[in-house]
Amino acid sequence: MALVFTAVDTTVLRLKGEDVVTYLQGQCTADIRQTPSVHALWLNRKGRVLAHTLVAAEPDGSFLLLAPHCQPADLISIISANLIADDVEVVDETQRWQRGIIWGQGQPEVSSSYKIFPSHRCGENNWELLSPLDFVSPWPLAEERLLEQNRVLTGVPSVPQDCGEQEFPQECGLEAWVSYQKGCYCGQEVMARIHAMGTLRRTLRRVSTSEAMVSLKTGLELKNLIDHKVVGVVRSVSAHHGLALVSAELTSGAILSSDLGPIVLGEKATLVNS
């Protein structure tokens, strides 16, 4: 598919101040010193996922944080929760930009007035775009439902739909966004323990109904065929395909029961081009 453009409601914050690098480095899961932009998770002290942001360094020493599926007030609360005496200012710039995703085959050419960052919104090549409010897309427009459909069909996890306050990043295929070398950050001890032990109780997998005419629904419980014990729940859907958090003991090809009939388990969810 050729490149297309999808408008999305991404929250955009700017963090600035003398302590901004130290603060970000000590709070999110990514090493922000390694690349101009990096995807990061914000965890609670138990290692569960509160938010996902793309962190991008700006020439003036500030950082832009782009967060899909998170309202500005909620993200500000998460980002500033541990701000005490740090010289860090958090500014909401969401309404300053038109926000969107460029996705498909090819490499976008953009104006110097735009900001573009590699992203993980679907299984195609895709980029986050911040542009002036009067931006007119040079690419054909695609509805957000098509972007979401591609994401689900290709097994790309999303925060918080698939991985939220009750899940570890590793359960949902998001371990690429977790640094095990950079030092202390909120939830780091739990991440190190999981990394060392290498065992998880749940994993996010692609799922589908055995009947193409039957559509999945979020929250659908998946059960063992033998004892009918609940072993998973559907988190994201697109028609008869979806992503479900299930027992880690289950493998691809397993058949589970549900109120909608048999459900077939597929491969694990994973980030594309991570």
Image: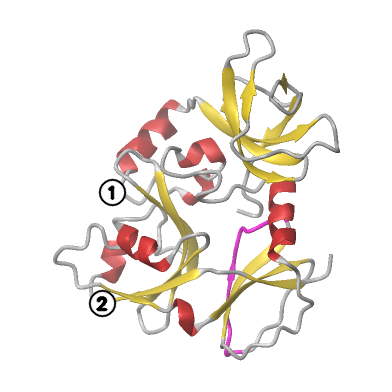
Q: Disc 2 vs disc 1: which is toward the camera?
A: 2
Q: Is residue 174 above or below residue 105?
A: above
> How crowded is the residue under tag 1: few (<14 C-alpha within 10 Å), some, or many (20+)?
some
| Residue 134: % across, % down | 61, 91
Q: CA distance from mark 2 to mark 1?
A: 21 Å
Residue 17 - label: 2
For the residue pair 186 and 245, the one nearer the viewer reads as 245
| Residue 143: % across, % down | 73, 67
For the residue pair 131 and 235, the one nearer the viewer reads as 235
Q: Residue at x 44, y 63 (%)?
A: 34
Instruction: Give, as a three-letter code, the residue at label 2.
Output: Gly
Location of mark 1 (residue):
184
The answer to whether residue 98 is left or right of residue 155 is: left
- Magenta residues (range): 112-123
Q: Residue at x 67, y 84 (%)?
A: 110
Residue 154 seen: no
Q: Earlier in the sequence, mark 2 or mark 1?
A: 2
Q: Is residue 74 magenta?
A: no
At numbered mark 2, what does the secondary structure look like: helix, strand or loop? Answer: loop
| Residue 44: % across, % down | 32, 45
At numbered mark 1, what does the secondary structure look like: helix, strand or loop? Answer: loop
For the residue pair 246 and 176, the one nearer the viewer reads as 246
| Residue 74: % across, % down | 37, 61
Q: Residue at x 85, y 37 (%)?
A: 212
Residue 236 seen: yes
Q: Is residue 115 magenta?
A: yes
The answer to whether residue 80 is left or right of residue 215 is: left
Instruction: Give, as a three-letter code, the residue at label 1.
Output: Cys
Q: Is residue 270 above or below residue 85?
A: above
Q: Is residue 61 above or below residue 247?
A: below
